[in-house]
Image (spheres, rainbow, N blue to C red):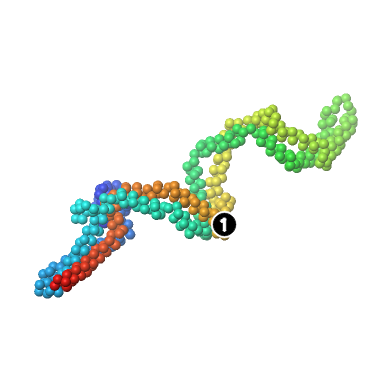
Amino acid sequence: MQVNSEQTTAPTGAHAATPTKAGGPAAGAPPQAVPAAGGPSGGMSAGDAEKARALRRMKSLALSLLVAMAVIFVFAFALQEEYPWLQYVRAAAEGGMVGALADWFAVTALFKYPMGLKIPHTAIIPRRKDQIGASLGEFVETNFLSEEVVQDKLATINIARRAGEWLTGPGGADRVAKEGAAIIRGAFTVLNDDDVQAVIEGLVRKHLVTPPWGPPVGKLAERIFADGHHHQLVDLLVDRAADWVADNREVVSRVVTDRSPTWVPSFVDGMVGDKVYLEVLKFAQAVQSDPQHQVRQSIDTYLKDLAQDLQYDPAMIARAEGIKAQVLGDPEVRELATRTWATVKNALLTAVDDPTSELTVRFKSAVRDFGLRLVNDTELAGKVNTWIGDAAGYLVRTYRSDIAAVITDTVSRWDAAETSRKIELQVGKDLQFIRINGTVVGSLAGLAIFTVAHFVFG
């Protein structure tokens, strides 16, 4: 069962015939670590190379013990008549050879046909590779992909606290911000601007253009007017009107003069203009100073009637729809969607590319604050751990068979000889101890059997 360097470094079967590409290793050069098609890596990593050397050493040691037993047996068998005590040595060597050969056969039968002979129940791994993969997948699914096992393990880890400590630690928030920026840039790269604008336009039409404006605006206005929130706006308008009248005496007088007949003397126009100005000023100041003035009450009545008309008067509702159509026609909606998307996209890309931008700084601060809450707020951490456990349980419960199928499908795609070689490389060193132990145990058993038989039968 000796494995030479070619067997431990070169792929077997179909993988050995893989052609080299231009610029690659020349024919006959040592194989590089290139993955074999459909199977495990056909190359030899540093770890695998060390395992191959250890396997060869153990095979050499096991073979050396067998050869030593054979040499001892030959000499003891030839000289036992002259030296009777050599009969015990011969029996021990004979038992050692039998044990070594039996265990060599057993170990070899796992990976290949012993001496190339297709003996039944040998070359187990190459012949039953797919069944082994299916059994391994079923074992993992049953014993590892169990909802209870996963949730119990997660409960002992306290993921929320660990995540919080990482987020508050050096570089945690920066890493999250960096990955988030990469996701945003990637999303903007993948998204088609026309498609996004079409979605925004559809949302605007659905939620802003299609619904009638009158009833909701009237209902909102009715609530505002009922609570008196409009009084501050009325006060502002009255104050501005009173200030304008006080500052524009000449304008009022000129308006009166311009409206009077031409035959009226100018001094009369001046007296009438002054009188009109004083009355207008007095009226504006009265409205300004009296919260219960008739003008204010008239304004309140008008606004409340307007709110009712917007909700229930078909004519007013139709007028509101006409205004909406003028403000948000098809070109306007399309332009609004385009401007909105362009503004959002440019603002986000600019913000995520600048580590000192307000968005990035605030995001990092929010991440650190959330991490502190995960560390200090036991209730929040418990909820997060519960959510994670439930999510993991759902994933395992729903996709456990699909996850385990990865093992089965992967093993089924591997080359049988390559798979056998890989497995032997991983466990072959330990299996060689079976041969060594078989040699030792066989020797002791042979010696014990011969001693007992000699003692009984003479």
Counting from the top left corner in percent of width and height, residue 38 is at 32, 47
- Up the image or down, 149 lies above or below 283; here it is below
The residue at 57%/58% (across/down) is 377
The residue at 62%/33% (across/down) is 211
Q: Quadrant of the N terminus?
A: bottom left
Crowd band around label 1 with a 10 angstrom C-alpha radius: few (<14), some (14–19), many (20+):
few
Report the front residue among 237 and 435: 435
Residue highlighted by disc 1: 379
Going by the image, does 231 lie left or right of 429?
A: right
> Can residue 335 be seen in the rendering of this structure?
no
**What count of labels does the image hold?**
1
Counting from the top left corner in percent of width and height, residue 123 is at 24, 53
Helix, strand or loop under label 1: helix
- Residue 70, by quadrant, is bottom left
Residue lying at the far left in this picture: please name it.
Answer: 82
Name the amino acid, label 1: Glu
> Can residue 50 be seen in the rendering of this structure?
yes
Counting from the top left corner in percent of width and height, residue 134 is at 33, 49
Report the front residue among 139 and 410: 139
The residue at 27%/64% (across/down) is 433
The residue at 31%/58% (across/down) is 426
Q: Quadrant of the C terminus?
A: bottom left
Report the front residue among 303 and 395: 395
Counting from the top left corner in percent of width and height, residue 283 is at 84, 37
- Up the image or down, 155 lies above or below 249; here it is below
Going by the image, does 54 lie left or right of 92?
A: right
